[in-house]
Image: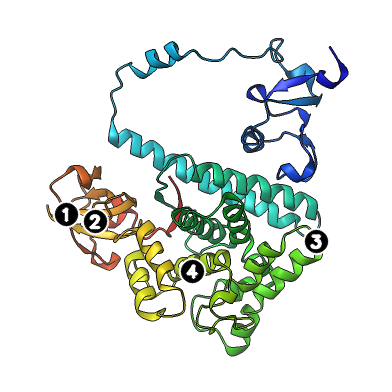
Amino acid sequence: MAKDTQNQLPVSKLQVGITVKLPLSWTEHPFLFNKIEIKSSEQIEMIRQLGVPYVQVLSGLETLPPDAFEIEKPVTIAAEVEVEQLPVAIDQSKTARVALRRSQKRFIDGMNQSRVMMSKVVSDPEGAVRETAVLVEMMLEHLFETEHSRLALVSSGETAVSITQHGISVATLALVMAKQLELTKPQIRTIATGAILHDLGKMKVPESIRRKRSGLTAHEKNFLAMHPNFGYDLLKRTGLFSEEVLHIVLHHHEFYDGSGFPDGLKGDAIPIGTQLVALANDFDTQLWREDIISPQIALGYMFKNRVGMHQQSLIQVLVKVLGIYPPGTLVQLSDGFIGKVMLTTENVAKPQVWSCKKDGSEAAFRFLIDEDVTVEAAVKPNELSAGATKTLKSNDGISFYLC
């Protein structure tokens, strides 16, 4: 075997535990170096998306099966047709449950990866860049898995929102809006990176201030308002993040009418990526206010109180991706049942819900789009019985992930 083809492993045979070299220049991939120690399935997916047929194995040969270096034969068209013609019985309820569990797991995995990344920004900035790249590519893979990205209701199980939980939820909303606007993949990648990192500076804000949901003193408000600058300084110091990403981190509290901070930027002086993250951040923040008790109320708040602060066209995009009843909204159904919206659908008035009777009995996952049942009104959590509150988990925090 010639030297330049030695240990060439098809990308379909990649596995965790080996170290490989990419046959690309450093400008053609998102990794920090061409030499990569594969530690996760997300890294494998990132490499597969690069479109290269093979990589060179540098170490870990002993862990590969004997036939690892054999080139796989392509599947014939005839075989594909045979598979497509097999009858498949689809249980929609089961499929939806699987999708929700998958979204929940991916959300928690994203939070954990984000937490690891943030812990390395100061002590191991190059490691932080790698962790960020893996997380971003994982989210982009999930975004483009289907033609029409949906939003799923997910939760960390915590009563107070964390920096990582908020970051992943904001990134999710910003990505779906960016896809709806048909932005380029490089733009979407930048938006994802900035959204995940946007509240990094809050790590320098005392937890007693961060988790205080109301009644901040003037001093506390001023200190909290410095978090974009703190985050920008931390990332700028590494010299490893693009100016576009840094702009998102520094300016995610700017408003289109110039009323935001820290620099009072106005109009088109705020790039579209920063605008999307600012809008997603604004909406997601409303979900954790004591006086905002429903995602639908939060959406109404945006319409009533954010006129001119965000581009109206972007707010319309947010409504389009969230639907009339965003995930997490409690609803009264026309058949007398109570429901909790779990997934968005193309028909915004007919979401997928987890429903039960008013006493919490007869719980079921339902597809309103397939039923002659409509949503009559949104319901406040304090209007539910103890049984319905338990069944619908109406007190859980609300975040979003791709489905």
162 displayed left or right of 351: right
What residue did someone put label 1 on? 374
Mark 1–mark 3 CB contact (< 8 Å): no
Dot 1, crowdedness within 10 Å: few (<14), some or many (≥20)?
some
Which quarter of the image is occupied by the N terminus? top right
Whether residue 132 is visible, yes or no, is yes
Task: Pick whichever of labels 2 and 4 is earlier in the sequence.
Answer: 4
- 352 over 315 or under it: above or below: above
Q: Are marks 1 and 4 in contact (CB under 8 Å)?
A: no
**SS at circle 3:** helix
Residue type at numbered disc 2: Ala
Disc number for residue 349: 2
Determine which of the numbered discs, if any, sits on residue 279 in the image: 4
Badge 4 vs badge 3, beta-carbon distance below 8 Å: no
Q: Residue at position x 76%, y 20% from top?
A: 8
Residue with the mark numbered 3: 238
Residue 23 appears in which quarter of the rendering? top right
Q: Nearer the viewer, residue 342 or 273?
A: 273
The C terminus - image quarter: top left
**Residue shown at the point (54%, 48%) measured from the top left:** 108
State the CA–CA distance, disc 2 to disc 4.
23 Å
Q: Residue furthest right?
A: 3
Q: CA distance from mark 2 to mark 1?
A: 8 Å
Expressed as whole percent of the image width and height from the top left, the position of residue 324 reads 29, 61
Left-right relation of 239 to 341: right
**Spot occupied by residue 390 in the image (x, y as percentages of width and height):** 31, 53
- The extreme bottom residue here reads 218
Tag 1 or tag 2, which sits nearer the N-term? 2
Q: Which quadrant holds residue 109? A: top right
Mark 1 vs 4, N-terminal side: 4
* Distance between mark 1 and mark 3 Cα atoms: 53 Å
Instruction: Say if mark 2 contacts mark 1, CB within 8 Å.
Output: yes
